Image (cartoon, rainbow, N blue to C red):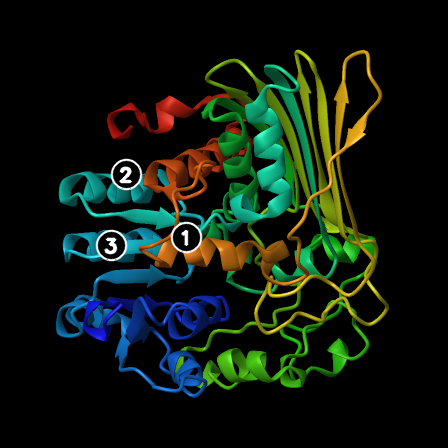
Amino acid sequence: MPLSSRRRYALVGAGSRAGMFLRAITGDHADVAELVAMADTNPARPAAHNRRLAEPVPVYDAADFTEMLKRERVDVVLVATVDRYHDHYVAAALDAGCDAITEKPMTVDVAGCRRILDAQRRTGRDVRVTFNYRYNPLHEAVKRVISSGEIGEVGSVHFEWLLDVRHGADYFRRWHRDKANSGGLLVHKAGHHFDLVNWWLDDGPEQVFAAGRLFFYGEQGRRHGYARDYDRAHGAADADGDPFALRMADEPTMRELYLDAEGNDGYIRDRNVFAPGVTIEDDMAVLVRYTRGASMSYHLTAYAPWEGYRVMFNGSRGRLELEVVESDHVSPGAAAGVKGEPGAESAAERGSKRLLVRPFWAPPREIAVDGLSRHGHGGADVRMLADLIRPDAPKDPLGRTANAVDGARALLTGLAANESLAHGQAVRVPDLLDLEDNE
């Protein structure tokens, strides 16, 4: 593609996750895409990314976002900010005549969801949501089995996701610990899982009931014997020897993006996970009924000794079972070993994967899956970025590309669960937001 024909990309939100997008645009897909600008509320973070680029780009204050879009003639905006601001930047990008690619969740509340859907309908511009789990070869195999009819009509799903004490703890030391910022783990993390089930079943949620609490982190840590008296780990003597203390000074990317950037905005990345102020839950159970009648029981635990998930589909002709062990334990001294870019590589401890079909009146059959990787969410990130960025990407028979309505379906499952947690009653999803007008 001639250089003049490349689509012009700008990034807003230059934290650790942004690196994935920047490498894709300036590396693998530089023949069809061009990075032209970055914006953030903290100038140190885009400056850090610029130091890694062969050709640095202009940096704007986030307050000058719309001016950046105009001045740099932006075609596509990549939104990787704190979750609560996604809708602001997505809607502004659409109104400025740009398309938008946003990190999940699409936003954190009904008003923000409606704002994006209204802007998309009003402008006719394109919104894509980065549900990278759809691109994992294991999840693609699940989709193919269900779509083939081998297990018949799906009557129910059981889905359990475990975050270990290395990964799960990290949500309780950064901005995610405040539900106003992230929507809680039922929005920020489980949104991935809710989207997978929507995609696997080709359906959407009708009614949701949830129960959950903050059991392990926050001030509960004192009850369990883990609490120490420090606010943040850096420079705190009480953090010495604490397996839950994040040591940013030991990891160059974390130091550059967060520790060295604190002077600009005061954001603290290494809070004590047992310090007061946590407003999200760490142990949650959800029941979902889908529009065509299937049900799902879902559980998310954020303080497990191992990391992975199990999902089972009960069908009219058999059962499909997927079990993934991403790390079978957390090694001593590694609980706070967060990498510079979360999700970049699987944990070093032993893992395993098994996909099994159990038909009626026949022995179980294991399905071999090729193309798995230890990098980028099992190799999913590379596939997703090619699909999102390349205009010559082949037509996808699995329909993995997620649009604004897909983003809304996953979000509304989590928002309905949060509403149910607050009031103790089942919540009808259309009562929060009816998506029929956006189909």
Secondary element under disc 1, as helix, strand or loop, is helix
Which residue matches tag 3?
A: 99
Q: Residue 409 bears which disc, if any?
A: none
Q: Is residue 355 above or below residue 154?
A: below
Judge depth for marks 1 and 2 and give the one in front.
1
Q: Amino acid at mark 3?
A: Asp
Q: Nearer the viewer, residue 200 or 96?
A: 200
Q: Nearer the viewer, residue 86 or 7?
A: 7
How far across and how far down the image is residue 137, in percent? 61, 46
Secondary element under disc 2, as helix, strand or loop, is helix
| Label 2 packing within 10 angstroms: few (<14), some (14-19), many (20+) | some
- Report the number of numbered marks: 3
Which of the two labelled residues, at mark 1 and mark 2, occupies the earlier sequence position?
2
Q: Is residue 436 above or below residue 266?
A: above
Judge depth for marks 1 and 3 and give the one in front.
1
How far across and how far down the image is residue 53, in percent? 41, 84
Q: Amino acid at mark 1?
A: Asp
Which residue matches tag 1?
A: 387
Left/right placement of residue 137 relative to residue 108 reads right
Cα separation, mark 2 vs mark 3, equals: 17 Å
